[in-house]
Amino acid sequence: MSRTIHSRFSSRQLPDLLQALLVAELIAPSACLWLVSPWVSDIPIIDNTANTFLALEPSWPRSKIRLTEVLATLSYLGTTVCLATRPDLHNRSFIETLTTLANNNYLRIHQVEELHTKGMLSDSFFLAGSMNFTFNGITVNEETLIYETALEAISEQKLNFRDRWGGAG
C-alpha cells in the first residue's frame, strides 16, 4: 500500500503522522530504524503532556518528547537506529545529544556531505519525500511525502540504504 501526503502550512498532519509512526515503533520495535535527513533537529515528536504514553516509557515527563529521546528509547529496546545526515554544524547538537542518550551498541551514524535524500525506514513502513526532520520541515514548509507499507518496497529500500550508507538494516 502506498499513500501520497501533501502537507499544508500550520497543519498537524505531519507531526501527527510522525507521532503515530514512532509510537507504533515503540509498541513493536523494528530490528532497524533508519532516519535519513540532510538537516535534523531535536524536534518535539510525541505529545506526552497528558501522560498519554506513560505505558510506553514510564520515565518520560509530562511534556513533549523530543526526537532524540524517542530514538534513544528505541535503541534501548534493541532497535538499531541508523542516522544518515550531513556533517553540518546544524546537525552537531542533535548527534551529540543522541550519542549521549542512546545505547551506542545500537546506534549507527553516517555523515555524507552530498546527502539530499530524506526519509524514515522501518521493518513495516517507508516514508520518503521532500521533508527534512526539522521544525520547518514538519510544521512550516509545504512538503510531499510517500508513505509505503508494501514489504517488497521496504525490502528494496533496506538494500538501497545499506548499499549507500552501510550499517544495519
Image (spheres, helix red, strand yellow):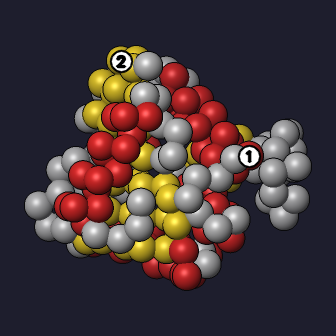
In this view, 5 is above or below 93: above
Quadrant in the picture for residue 49 = top right
Label placed on residue 27: 1
Q: Residues within 10 Å of mark 1 (few under 14, many from 20)?
A: few
Disc 1 marks which amino acid? Ile
Cα–Cα span, label 2 and label 1: 25 Å
Side (left or right) of 15 relative to 129: right
For image coordinates 87% across by 44% down, the residue present is 51
Quadrant assignment for the N terminus: top left
Determine whether the residue tagged by mark 2 lies in a helix, strand or loop.
strand
- Of residue 15 and residue 21, the one placed in the foreground of this image is 21
Q: Quadrant of residue 111?
A: bottom left
Front-lying residue, 87 or 75? 75
Check disc 1 and report its element: helix, strand or loop: helix
Q: Residue furthest front?
A: 152
Image spot of residue 2 (x, y percent): 39, 20
**Residue type, numbered disc 2:** Thr
Residue situated furthest left in the rendering: 114
Disc marking residue 39: none
Which residue is rendered at x = 65% and y = 52% of the image? 29
Q: Position of residue 87 (x, y in %)?
A: 24, 72
Give the residue at x 64% y 61%. Answer: 74
Compared with residue 71, is residue 29 higher up or lower down, i.e. above or below? above
Q: Quadrant of the C terminus?
A: bottom left
- Kindly identify which residue carries mark 2: 4
* Residue at (59% x, 75% y) in the render: 102
Q: Nearer the viewer, mark 2 or mark 1?
A: 1
118 or 62: nearer the viewer: 118
| Label 2 close to label 1 by CB (< 8 Å) | no
Across and down, in percent, residue 143 comes to: 31, 27
